[in-house]
Image (cartoon, rainbow, N blue to C red):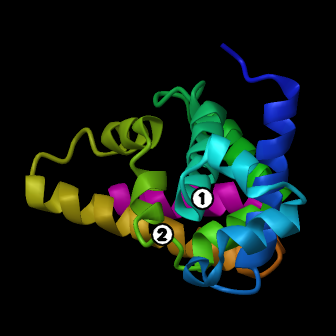
Amino acid sequence: MPENTKITRTKHRLSKALLHLLAEKPITAVSIRELCETAGINRTTFYNHYGSQYDLLNDIRSRFLDDVAECLAAADPANSESIQERVTTVFSYIKDNSELSYLLLNNGIDPEFAEQLFSLPKITDLLAAALLNCHDPMRRQAVTDFAVHGSFRLLQNWINSGCERSPAEEAELILELARRVCI
């Protein structure tokens, strides 16, 4: 059942407030009082939706990952144009949400974020399809690790540089490099 508009607006205000505060300080230094003041809501309202600032952050991160997964959902592992189009859509989403992307990719808020992002089922499927002819499990794992962590670092560099290349150019670069590694 979809949330009502008031709840959606409240959660949006809280998310915006947390992102604003995280741009200035680590989450460990963000108090609920400060978060509520920044969002312009009372603590009771906050606690109606979340138990802590970490729960709010988990909600923000989950929505981000869900949105990325949705962008990738239609990618056909057998069709490189489809993959290029979907990965470009992901990079467009990341660019459109650059403040959130920057914080999730750099802030150290969640050291497991890279693993969560690159272990989305569709990304796992795409890597598995690219490594179909690799029968050595150790090599397969090494190539997967290299592709995942290398791609994450390129993504991080791209967002940190203010998205100098277009989403399509960045997607093309990462896919080209990933294909080379997967050979």
Q: Position of residue 168 (x, y in %)?
A: 77, 53
Disc tally is 2
Residue pointed to by mark 1: 57
Q: Nearer the viewer, residue 111 or 141?
A: 111
Quarter assignment of residue 30: bottom right
Does residue 145 show up? Answer: yes
Kindly check if marks 1 and 2 are in contact, taking CB atoms under 8 A apart as contact. yes
* Boundaries of the magenta span: 169-183
Which residue type carries mark 1?
Answer: Leu
Q: Position of residue 155 (x, y in %)?
A: 62, 68
Query: Which numbered circle lies on residue 35?
Result: none
Q: Residue furthest top?
A: 1
For label 1, the SS is: helix
Label 1 and label 2: CA atoms lie apart by: 9 Å
In the rendered view of the protein, which quadrant contains the C terminus? Answer: bottom left
Rendered position, 102 above or below 160? above
